[in-house]
Image (cartoon, coloured by chain):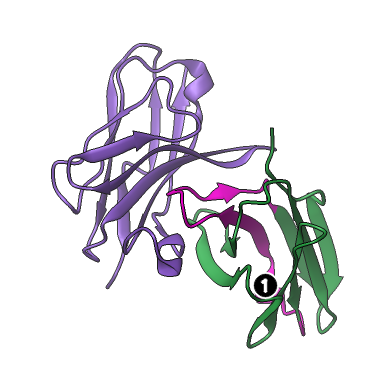
Amino acid sequence: DQQVKQNSPSLSVQEGRISILNCDYTNSMFDYFLWYKKYPAEGPTFLISISSIKDKNEDGRFTVFLNKSAKHLSLHIVPSQPGDSAVYFCAASSYNTDKLIFGTGTRLQVFP
Amino acid sequence: EAQVTQNPRYLITVTGKKLTVTCSQNMNHEYMSWYRQDPGLGLRQIYYSMNVEVTDKGDVPEGYKVSRKEKRNFPLILESPSPNQTSLYFCASSLSTGTASSYEQYFGPGTRLTVT
């Protein structure tokens, strides 16, 4: 059973506009959430994270929102740039485990 | 430069021929892990290690072995590879467990394995 779901396999956005990537989870024990970015032929790299005690975390052009009641998080990229084109994975964990559970990924394409 | 290295990057082998994929990190990280990435399934954890001589199964451990004899190295062993182990494999490491920073894992570049 997929505990972390990214229901949109792909997203296409024009340069300068906002990109919104979504992630849903089913396990209410998750209390820490992360986004990773992956370019072709490279390993994933950490992008941004959020603890369950917050509902928003911002880092430059990237903002992650967490809605615990809906078990939903989203990553906003504003403004989107062509270099943001990559696969984005959301991941979740809880402090009493040693595992990260990843979603299936969303491929973002930012076109000029 | 802080990094996680994996070797080989590409490997084509035949069913049943034992192989080892090496993983090494130079950041003195306690936690190391192996994942496989398959289309439509995302990244799934195979095995992880919280420190030297401490390993545990992830979500898909069948057909794999690991060892952690030194802090920096965490090899993945396939004793008798089968075609369903054809995948893209990633090694990752992080500082420690039990803290928020432990989830900010550093990933290697990946090993693409094909078993025929």
Give the colour of chain A. Answer: green
In this view, the residue in front, B75 or B51, is B51
Q: Height in image: B38 above or below B26?
A: above
Please state the horizontal and vertical placement of residue B5, each as a whole percent of the image. 30, 54
Seen from this angle, which residue lies furthest top?
B16
| Kind of residue indicated by mark 1 | Asp
Image chain in purple: B
Q: Along the horizontal axis of the image, is A75 left or right of A51?
A: right
Badge 1: chain ID: A
In this view, the residue in front, B23 or B29, is B29
Q: Along the horizontal axis of the image, is A46 left or right of A65?
A: left
Report the span colored magenta: A78-105
Residue at x-position 28% and y-position 38%: B55
Residue at x-position 20% and y-position 41%: B68
Residue located beneath label 1 in the image: A84
Residue at x-position 48% and y-position 57%: A95
